[in-house]
């Protein structure tokens, strides 16, 4: 993953800790789970995590999933301001699949131009079942989670 290494080179210590926690997670993490994971690294205050999350969001290295109030590491790194960013969130294993579909982006950009609406950010969150869970064999790492 050369892109992400390159993009994370000049992060502060807390920012890289938070980023690696998200990057290595199997699914989305809430700010409090991140804090729990990083206590052993010396992070104590939720404020430290929130500050790092804000910076990482600003730089486009992570995304916030509004519907479940959790964060994931970005797997694309090539979003533009107009890009539609989509997330398919599995309700059983909590896996998140990030996608970016140029056709969707064009449709919405056309619509926005027609309406004279200036788009700042478009995020689509889809809830459902991933392929494995739909087939009845959810990955086991999240068993007992929640
Ligand atoms: Zn992304
Ligand atoms: Zn699943």
Image: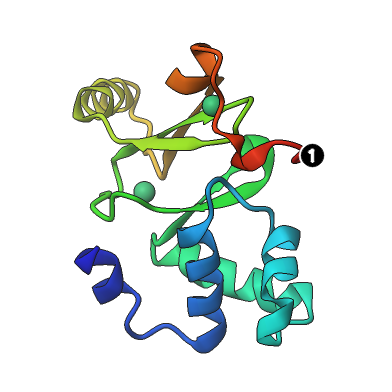
Classify 39 as above or below 60. Answer: below
Q: How many marks?
A: 1
Q: Position of residue 137 (x, y in %)?
A: 54, 20
Q: Residue at 48%, 69% (x, y): give it.
A: 20
Q: Quadrant of residue 7?
A: bottom left
Q: Position of residue 21 (x, y in %)?
A: 55, 66
Q: Residue at 65%, 40% (x, y): give it.
A: 142
Classify 3 as above or below 43. Answer: above
The C terminus lies in quadrant: top right
Q: Position of residue 14 (x, y in %)?
A: 57, 82
Classify 32 as above or below 129. Answer: below
Q: Residue at 52%, 87% (x, y): give it.
A: 13
Q: Is residue 130 visible?
A: no
Q: Residues within 10 Å of mark 1 (few under 14, many from 20)?
A: few
Pick the front one: 15 or 139: 139
Q: Residue at 54%, 77% (x, y): give it.
A: 17
Q: Position of residue 28 (x, y in %)?
A: 58, 47
Q: Quadrant of residue 103?
A: top left
Classify 137 as above or below 13. Answer: above
Q: Is residue 61 visible?
A: yes
Q: Secondary structure at mark 1?
A: loop
Q: Quadrant of residue 85?
A: top left
Colouring of the image: rainbow
The N terminus lies in quadrant: bottom left
- Left or right for 58, reference 118: right
Is the CB atom of the residue marked by disc 1 within 8 angstroms of ligand 2's nearest atom? no
Q: Report which residue position mark 1 lands on.
A: 146
């Amino acid at each position: 993953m050369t892109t992400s290494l390159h993009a994370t080179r000049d992060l502060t210590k807390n920012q890289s800790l938070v980023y690696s926690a998200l990057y290595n997670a199997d699914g989305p993490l809430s700010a409090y789970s991140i804090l729990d994971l990083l206590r052993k690294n010396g992070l104590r205050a939720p404020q430290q995590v929130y500050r790092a999350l804000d910076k990482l969001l600003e730089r486009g290295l992570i995304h916030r999933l509004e519907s479940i109030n959790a964060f994931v590491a970005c797997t694309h790194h090539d979003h533009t301001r107009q890009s539609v960013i989509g997330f398919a969130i599995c309700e059983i294993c909590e896996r998140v699949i990030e996608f970016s579909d140029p056709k969707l982006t064009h449709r919405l950009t056309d619509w926005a131009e027609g309406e004279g609406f200036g788009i700042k950010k478009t995020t689509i969150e889809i809830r459902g079942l991933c392929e494995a869970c739909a087939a009845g064999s959810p990955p086991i790492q999240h068993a007992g989670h929640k």
